[in-house]
Amino acid sequence: MTAVGRPRRSCLAVPGSSVKMLGKAQGLPADQVFLDLEDAVAPLAKPDARKNIVAALNEGDWTGKTRVVRVNDLTTPWTYRDVIEVVEGAGANLDCIMLPKVQNAEQVHWLDLLLTQIERTLGLEVGRIGIEAQIENAAGLVNVDAIAGASPRVETIIFGPADFMASINMKSLVVGALIPDYPGDPYHYILMRILMAARMHDKQAIDGPFLQIRDVDAFREVAKRSAALGFDGKWVLHPGQIDAANEVYSPAQADYDHAELILDAYDYYTSEAGGKLGAVMLGDEMIDEASRKMALVIAAKGRAAGM
Ligand code: GLV
Ligand code: MG
């Protein structure tokens, strides 16, 4: 499954406690914004942050962006009030709720039911608000298949590398970067595990943050690894990372052009043959149904990116 949904190449984190950043984010070229009530917001600032977020969603101009709010995780006392205040206050101007540190499918069921109750009460379309599930600990990763399939509202599975590294006692402080003592990519298994669960349920897979925000080249290197596997996008913590993410998670122009050529050639030759040809030649390259599907993925990503 290809899971080409809303564009999410760049998912910009915006602290709900900063009215200034909530304003500035509206003019930035990120595909998605997520207005944060969790780790970017201090406990005492959370009540005001909820109000700032509701106001920004209702009064701001978020045209062209997917609007997401990250609530606090279910081990805290804040989650239910986060969801109720934000969805009651701005449910019509909100696309998804992001649930961090998801550990099992039941936590997604809880959010699904709460959203349904609020939508019904407010007369909103039931089921329109999606869920983004962040995988940030061993329980979440072990249960990721069930989490991805827990509700039709789930749109993305997100890798949260900082919390994940802490939760499994990883011996590194540089989030997402390779570890010199480890001969390989220490994130490969986690990324692939998330990607398989996401694709099994036709969801998008999103890579998490890179904290060295001034080192855009290093951001690009980390992003390229998950993009190569098939991830749909990555978090950006700073405006300087947005263009790099939009570029890395779009196909290269040459690949996009080639994909469109494959699709045209395959359609042309197979219809010429009255549907009796399974494989055709494009120059020196043999194209069959599987190569057509590969080309479809690249073409869809490129079209979504406006290529
Ligand atoms: C994001 O939430 C992370 O923990 O990396
Ligand atoms: Mg986290």
Image (cartoon, rainbow, N blue to C red):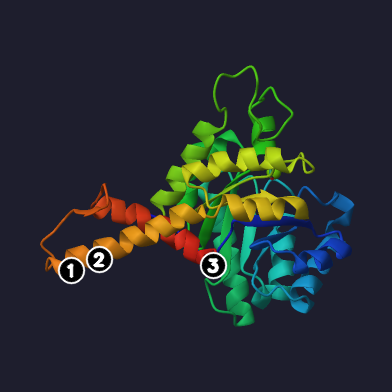
Which residue position holds label 1? 271
Query: Which is nearer the N-term, disc 3 or disc 2?
Result: 2
Q: Measuring 52% from the left and 32% from the top, which residue is drawn there?
A: 188
Residue type marked 3: Gly
Query: Which is nearer the N-term, disc 3 or disc 1?
Result: 1
- Few, some or many residues within 10 Å of mark 1 (<14, 14–19, 20+): few
Q: Name, please, the residue furthest toward the top.
A: 181
- 250 vs 141, nearest the viewer: 250
As drawn, the label of residue 222 is none
Q: Name, please, the residue furthest toward the front.
A: 283
Distance between the Cα atoms at labels 3 and 2?
22 Å
Q: Measuring 70% from the left and 40% from the top, which residue is drawn there?
A: 217
Residue 161 placement: quadrant: top right
Which residue position holds label 3? 306
Residue type marked 2: Asp
User: Would you place residue 173 above or below residue 99 in this image?
Assistant: above
Q: Where is residue 83 shown, x and y percent of the image? A: 69, 63
- Asked if the residues shown at circle 1 and circle 2 are in contact, with their CB atoms under 8 angstroms apart, the answer is yes
